[in-house]
Image (tube, rainbow, N blue to C red):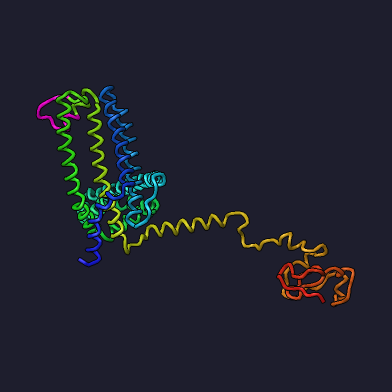
Amino acid sequence: MTVKTTNNLGVLLRSYEALHNWQALAMLAGSFILAGLAMMGGAAATASSGSYAVSMLMGLVGAIIAIIGINASGLMLVDQAYDQPVRGFGAAFLGGLQAALHVIGALILLGVGFAMVLVAAYLLSLLGRIPGVGGVFGFLLAGPSVVIVALAYAVLVLATPLMVAAIWHGEGLISSLSRAADIVIKKPLEVLMHFLVLGLVVFPAAVFIFGLVFGASTEIARMYAAVGLGGFEAGDGSSLMQLLLAQMTSYGFGGAGISIGLVTFLAWSVVSLIYVLGLIFVYRAVNEGVGSEAAELVGQRLSQFKQKLDGYKPGTGSAPPAPSEATQDATPGATPEASAPTPGPIQPSGPLAETPAQPGLASPASADTRLCPACGAVVAADDAFCRRCGQPLHSR
């Protein structure tokens, strides 16, 4: 194990510093509590009416609230991980909403890709049913299919959290998915090792926190059940889960049940916050030195497509632009021939061609105009500078 890998793994111990970020903790805890209220409200409505439609709807609402809160807190923890000022609640909420949409879209694409791999493997397996040569196809295709499907499982399990972390780091929908897949394909064992270490870091905290909450909740639930408050049914030997189920099926959620449930969601938010910061550290460690060829290829294709669209826009041809009115009408006596730029001095056309204008000689056509000695443009006699090239014009 190299020193760099050891340092990358050691930084995961700093995941507990997420609890110092009170903004991220408040955002995540608030979203989990609102999600819990929505879910418990749906369960209570189902227990009283017997209809599961309300419970499913409220469960969906609670899941959306929780997803937005996780992404918003993830953006705040990214600021903390890179020693940047932590963004405010409004900016984090809007960023979390946008990130949640990207996460949902990326999960859909990831699921579709995994389903396509399974369908392709199934279609290849049909070749093994051909009489006579089916055994040959089975020998040639079964083993590679196992490798491909196993790699698809690895991408599905390991790339999903990395994809979410990539979105928090500012990657787009396609680029985050391709980058996460590239990391898993190029560094599968290193990614697995980082996630195992992160699990070892988070697991003791989860056991400790949920053990305390479960033990205290069981005792408090027994107290409220014994005195008949909060909607609990009294009973000897009842666990917390049995008390909550009895409450949902008989009396509905009382005040004590709601309070205990919210504390449970608060415990989930503390454990989740530690995991989110650890996930950011994992992504930063395994992302070093990995380039996303798929993202670059998609970017090149989009750039080429944009250039083609720009080529079809009006006015983008290769013809030179027409001279402006300001150039043509620089002076009252200017003509189009005199206004066009030429390599040498412009020779007057018409009757003046036989007798070129000489300095100091006045003629009807050049009484109030003269030629610029630098570019040959026609300028007024009293101009101090050429209106075309800026050449100083000294009085003769």
Residue positioned 69% across, 61% down in the render:
322
| Residue 235 in which image quadrant | top left
User: Up-down: is 27 above or below 377?
Assistant: above
| Residue 179 in which image quadrant | bottom left
Does residue 161 show up?
Answer: yes
User: Up-down: is 252 above or below 280?
Assistant: above
Quadrant where the image shows the N terminus: bottom left
| In the image, residue 237 lies in the stretch drawn in magenta | yes
Quadrant where the image shows the C terminus: bottom right
Residue positioned 22% across, 67% down in the render:
2
Does residue 116 show up?
Answer: no
Magenta-highlighted residues: 233-244
Where residue 44 sits in the image (x, y, percent)?
A: 27, 27
Judging depth in this view, the residue of 394 and 110 nearest the camera is 394
Judging depth in this view, the residue of 203 and 154 nearest the camera is 203
Where residue 255 sits in the image (x, y, percent)?
A: 25, 28
| Residue 257 in which image quadrant | top left
| In the image, residue 387 lies in the stretch drawn in magenta | no
Judging depth in this view, the residue of 73 and 62 nearest the camera is 73
